[in-house]
Image (cartoon, rainbow, N blue to C red):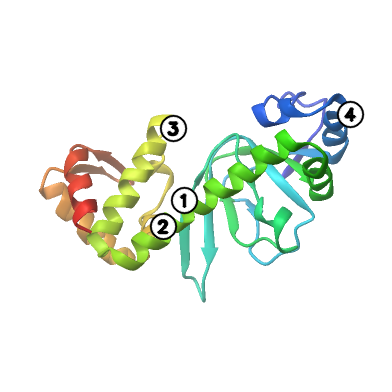
Amino acid sequence: MKTITENDEAFLCDIQAPCFQLLTQEEMELIRTSKTQVLFRKGDNLTKQGAFSSYILFILTGLVRQFIEGTGSRNFNLRIMRPGEFVGLSSVFTNNTYSYSAIAITSCQAYLVEKAAITDIIRNNGMFGFDIIKRYIEQNVNLYGTIHNLVYKQMNGRLADALLSLNSDNEQQENVFSLLSRKDLADFVGISMESVVKMLKSYEKEGILALNEKDIVILNEKALHEISKRG
């Protein structure tokens, strides 16, 4: 992790995200004086589950993997977070600790904004508060969908859902599959890496996808949707 100052070429001098355009000049100045711009290198932790949260993060560039830490080395990946998203938003409304971990899967730039500044603005700026609450609810809705799939679908259905979701990320960003190990993919599905490798090879034989080392190319998206539907 490296702090970026105004003298660095990578410095982004203004906050361009639509949600920050809802702020008054005074509120914008509060954000500017309460933020630090940071460069996270690939593999750096943005948040650590259970750690004290004095700030939230706003992703400017790069991709982040959000996950729940389990016992031992077992984790469960929730989703890929992209530029324009807040990390640690739940700590504004609930606990003073981060409820999940987040790790950079590419180099990332982010604003670290003091949580107290965000809280004060939410209390006084209804439109900004509405936008933040909307984002928070959308994250929860996605989480409910993940829980539903985990509880009610078999391994094939869960893997199909993960592949479809990550392939959707591919359409918006660089090739996400090439950034994830088979262990990472297994942690999106909640099964062993061996089972994921076996099912991927089966899908390849059926012509549903093509494998090239870490990369995965979806060839038959309709077939994946059918597998997902059957669960």
Tag 3 residue: 174
Residue lying at 48% horizontally and 56% vertically, measured from the top left: 143
Query: Is residue 209 toward the left or the right of residue 87 in the image?
Result: left
> Marks 4 and 2, Cα distance to the nearest angstrom?
39 Å
- Between circles 2 and 3, the one closer to the viewer is 2
Vertical position of residue 210 compared to residue 174: above or below: below
| Amino acid type, label 1 | Asn
Residue lying at 77% horizontally and 27% vertically, measured from the top left: 8
Mark linked to residue 146:
2
Of residues 180 and 117, the one nearer the viewer is 117
Q: Tell me whether the residue at label 1 lies in contact with that at label 4, contact meaning CB atoms closer than 8 angstroms.
A: no
Query: Is residue 162 toward the left or the right of residue 82 in the image?
Result: left
Other residues around mark 3 within 10 Å, as few (<14) / some (14–19) / many (≥20): few
Mark linked to residue 142:
1
Other residues around mark 1 within 10 Å, as few (<14) / some (14–19) / many (≥20): few
Give the residue furthest to the bottom. 71
Of residues 142 and 15, the one nearer the viewer is 142
> Marks 1 and 2, Cα distance to the nearest angstrom?
6 Å
Vertical position of residue 8 compared to residue 131: above or below: above
